[in-house]
Image (cartoon, coloured by chain):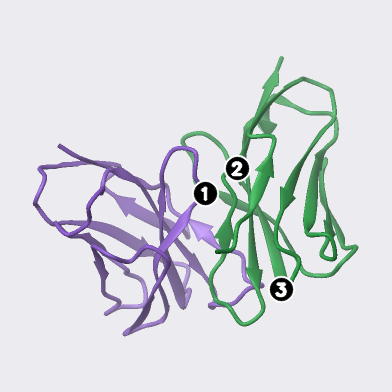
Chain colours: A green, B purple
C-alpha cells in the first residue's frame, strides 16, 4: 500500500514568521508530486506540480522543493500572513498510475 | 464563472437509502474524480472518469456507483451497501487524466446517514 505522510499534522505560526513542513512518500517509481492549499469553507486549490529531483517551484511567498531519491518534499512559506491559514495537502503518483495518493494534510494557523 | 459545483452542501439520509451526489463542471475538462475525506485521513479516491462513458474504480469503490453520460456531469450514488457512508465527499476535474495535470475541486458535500 502506497503511503504519504505529512508532518506536522498541525502548526501554529506567528504572523510574519517563516515556516515549513514536510511531505514524505515512497521514492521508488516516483512520477509526480502535487501540493494543494485548502482554506476553510473553500475548495482545495493547486499550488505546484513537481516532477524532477531537485526541482524548486515558487508562487509569491510560497515555495516547494523536491527530493525524489530520498522521498520528500518541503513546502516553505516566507513571512506568514493570516490568509496563509489553511490545510496544505500533498499527493504523489507513481509511474504508470492514473491516481493521486494524498497525505492527511498539515493544518497551518497563522496567529496575528 | 468556470468551475465545479456540487450539490447539496449538506445531505442527510436514513440508513438503507441510496443517495446521489451531484457534480457539474463547466471547465470543459475530460477527467473527473470523486474523493472521500474522513477525519485524520487523506483524500481517498472512490471513482474516476477519463472521458465520457468511461469510468474506473478507485481505492474504495465498494458501495458506490457512478455514471458519466455527459462530459460536464459525474454523479456519485452512495448505495445501501456502503457500510460507513457518513463522510465529506469532494468532486474534482482535470483537463485530462494524467499525473501532471492539476485537479480542480468543488466545494464538497457532507453526507450524514442517520
Side of B99 where B28 appears, left or right: left
- Is the residue at mark 3 from the same chain as the one at mark 1? no
Q: Which residue is mark 1?
A: B42
Say which chain tag 2 marks: A
Mark 3: give few (<14), some (14-19) or many (20+) Cα within 10 Å.
Answer: some
Name the quadrant containing residue A17. Answer: top right
Q: Residue at x 41, y 69 (%)?
A: B58
Vertical side of B41 occupied by B66: above or below = below
What x and y, as percent, mark residue B66? 27, 70
What x and y, as percent, mark residue B15? 11, 45
From mark 2 to mark 1, how far is it between C-alphas?
Answer: 7 Å
The disc, 2 or 3, on the residue closer to the chain's N-terminal end is 3
What x and y, as percent, mark residue A101? 57, 61
Say which chain tag 1 marks: B
Q: Residue at x 48, y 52 (%)?
A: B43
Q: Which residue is mark 3?
A: A31
Amino acid at each position: 500500500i502506497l503511503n504519504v505522510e505529512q508532518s506536522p499534522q498541525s502548526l501554529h505560526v506567528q504572523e510574519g514568521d517563516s515556516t515549513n513542513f514536510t511531505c514524505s512518500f515512497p521514492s521508488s517509481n516516483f512520477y509526480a508530486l502535487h501540493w494543494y492549499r485548502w482554506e476553510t469553507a473553500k475548495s482545495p486549490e493547486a499550488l505546484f506540480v513537481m516532477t524532477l529531483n531537485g526541482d524548486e517551484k515558487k508562487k509569491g511567498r510560497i515555495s516547494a522543493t523536491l527530493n525524489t531519491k530520498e522521498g520528500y518534499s518541503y513546502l516553505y512559506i516566507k513571512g506568514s500572513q493570516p490568509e496563509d491559514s489553511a490545510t496544505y495537502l500533498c499527493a504523489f503518483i507513481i509511474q504508470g498510475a492514473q491516481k493521486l495518493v494524498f497525505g492527511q494534510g498539515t493544518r497551518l494557523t497563522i496567529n496575528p | 464563472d468556470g468551475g465545479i459545483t456540487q450539490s447539496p452542501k449538506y445531505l442527510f439520509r436514513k440508513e438503507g437509502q441510496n443517495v446521489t451526489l451531484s457534480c457539474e463542471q463547466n471547465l470543459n475538462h475530460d477527467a473527473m474524480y470523486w474523493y472521500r475525506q474522513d477525519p485524520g485521513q487523506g483524500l481517498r479516491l472512490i471513482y474516476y472518469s477519463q472521458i465520457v462513458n468511461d469510468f474506473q474504480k478507485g481505492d474504495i469503490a465498494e458501495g458506490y456507483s457512478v455514471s458519466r453520460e455527459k462530459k460536464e456531469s459525474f454523479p456519485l450514488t452512495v448505495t445501501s451497501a456502503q457500510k460507513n457512508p457518513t463522510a465529506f465527499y469532494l468532486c474534482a476535474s482535470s483537463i485530462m487524466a494524467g499525473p501532471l495535470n492539476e485537479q480542480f475541486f468543488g466545494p464538497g458535500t457532507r453526507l450524514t446517514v442517520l
